[in-house]
Amino acid sequence: MNSLPHYIDGAWKKSGGDTLAVDNPATLEVIANVPLGTSAEVNEAVKAAAAAFPEWRNTPTNTRIQYLFKLKMLLEDHVDEIAQLITLECGKTLAESRGELRRAIENVEVACGMPVMIQSEFSEDIARGIDEYMIRQPLGVCACIAPFNFPGMIPFWFLPYAIACGNTFIVKPSEKVPLTMAKVFELIEQLDLPAGVLNMVHGGRDVVDTLLEHPEIKAISFVGSTPVARYVYERAAKFGKRVQAQGGAKNPIIILPDADPDMTTKIVTDSVYGCAGQRCLAASMVVTVGNHSAITDQLVDAARSRVTGNGLDEGVQMGPVITPQSKQRIESIIQEGVSEGAKLVLDGRQGARDAKGNFIAPTILKDIPLDGKIVRTEIFGPVMGLVHLDSIDEAIQFVNSGEYGNMACIFTSSGANARRFRHDVQAGNVGINIGVAAPMAQFPFSGWKSSFFGDLHGQSRHAVEFFTQTKVVVERWLDTWSRTF
Ligand code: NAD
């Protein structure tokens, strides 16, 4: 099997470096070979992007967004084909893959509004006859480093904004799921963008390090686990770059006794088990407050009835986890929970019937000890942890004592309790009777605490601010210089 090429300077380039086999997580068949990239190849991409920058930044914003309108139509026309690839390499169901692509396309649509979003401020007469205004200008070459779990969506939190603002861009997809972006770049090739404006370099750690250290790269957008996010943030900052680094999560959901039981059960189990729990907005800890036995039984029944299998198959509701190592890691966390004293009320470790992929069926650990390790550990798999607390105060305190702050949700029919939760909770994305509080493209993806390192988030106006630098001009024109012709 040939290894996938990079896309550099408007052309496909074969890598000279080592390669890695990519498996279909549902069947363990090898579906691609991905190059691990080399520093020389990164340098080539940066050189092309730097060469394209002066002309691209002088291209009017209204002209730049025409490429994005075309990209939206191409993505729409290929949704099914790309969704198949996402499911093939990432494992999620086809419906989940299509949903992911909708979110990618929404970002292209919002970035098409760049002529308005990039507008700035003007104050006339800040002193007599003097005006002051601010303009936003692009930074230069920017790059993003993506995780495995949303191969079609996450680069779009950055890419359309970066180029609409006048920057040139390099995408480094996750080496675990390189096929989706390879397909997206086939579509990008059809845009007839000037060569070097958009580039893709495959690879792992060495490629990341070269991107972080390259003097010509001005900004890095990273999404992945917290230890790597922290590393990327520190290293890129050391090399003088702007950084936005989104990290891991351990998302809690609080269920108050007045929550609607049927709606809550459906939404909470979708949140925990959607994408096999491999979403940074997957609920991981479910906190029931007060009277809880009925809702607990309902959650267990709903989890048990979920169909696990190959995401390409009709009727399957949950696919595999990404790698055998991931499966092993999740299974050992489940075991650790049991050792810590939690009750395993639903054990998914038998996986899916007749399947040899990386399957774990829905799992529930109940009465997790609050002083244990797994109450704080990101599992990133289809495991619900249940704890019971006596009051909303204790529940909010529990949420706020965690290391992460990606998302927190509450289920209740009390507006006053919901408001209190929204006001006091230390998380950047909040759901009220919502289980996956994923911000639409016109809002920033607002992780807090160890779920985010930086200042400006991906998507929305935050992305416009991240991908531009401000220039403030103070201007005087004397009346005595006026001329009559
Ligand atoms: P990961 O951190 O292992 O990898 C992310 C990227 O970093 C990949 O492109 C990889 O090649 C690179 N990388 C990995 N190790 C590296 C190292 N030591 N040095 C330099 N680069 C390295 O993450 P993953 O397993 O691909 O993705 C899952 C994680 O991403 C979870 O923790 C999840 O919560 C998080 N995530 C967060 C968000 C968010 O918005 N906060 C969104 C999606 C995923």
Image (tube, helix red, strand yellow):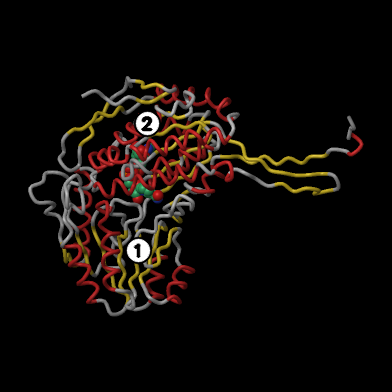
Q: What amino acid type should be assigned to the residue bearing mark 1?
A: Pro
Q: Nearer the viewer, residue 233 or 107?
A: 107
Q: Quadrant of the C terminus?
A: top right
Say which element carries label 1. strand
Q: Residue 479 in the image: x percent, y percent? A: 89, 39
Q: What residue lies at 36% left-to-right and 22% top-to-bottom?
A: 12
User: Quadrant of the rendered structure where residue 322 is?
Assistant: top left
User: Quadrant of the rendered structure where residue 118 is?
Assistant: top right
Q: What amino acid type should be assigned to the residue bearing mark 2?
A: Leu
Say which element carries label 2. helix
User: Quadrant of the rendered structure where residue 176 is?
Assistant: top left
Q: What residue lies at 32% left-to-right and 41% top-to-bottom?
A: 79
Q: Please, which residue is most extreme toward the right here?
A: 480
Lateral position of residue 351 relative to residue 14, left or right: left
Q: Which residue is mark 1?
A: 252
Lateral position of residue 346 relative to residue 136, left or right: left
* Mark 1 vs mark 2, CA separation in Å: 38 Å
Residue 225 visible to the viewer = no
Label 2 near ligand 1 (CB < 8 Å):
no
View quadrant of ligand 1? top left
Q: Which residue is mark 2?
A: 187
> How many numbered discs, if any?
2
Q: Residue 232 in the image: x percent, y percent? A: 44, 41
Q: What residue lies at 32% left-to-right and 32% top-to-bottom?
A: 183
Q: Residue 369 in the image: x percent, y percent? A: 27, 68
Q: Please, which residue is most extreme toward the front here?
A: 485
Lateral position of residue 11 relative to residue 161, left or right: left
Residue 134 visible to the viewer = yes
- Counting residues from the start of the chain, the first of labels 1 and 2 encountered is 2
Q: Quadrant of the N terminus?
A: top left
State yes or no: discs 1 and 2 in contact (Cβ < 8 Å). Answer: no
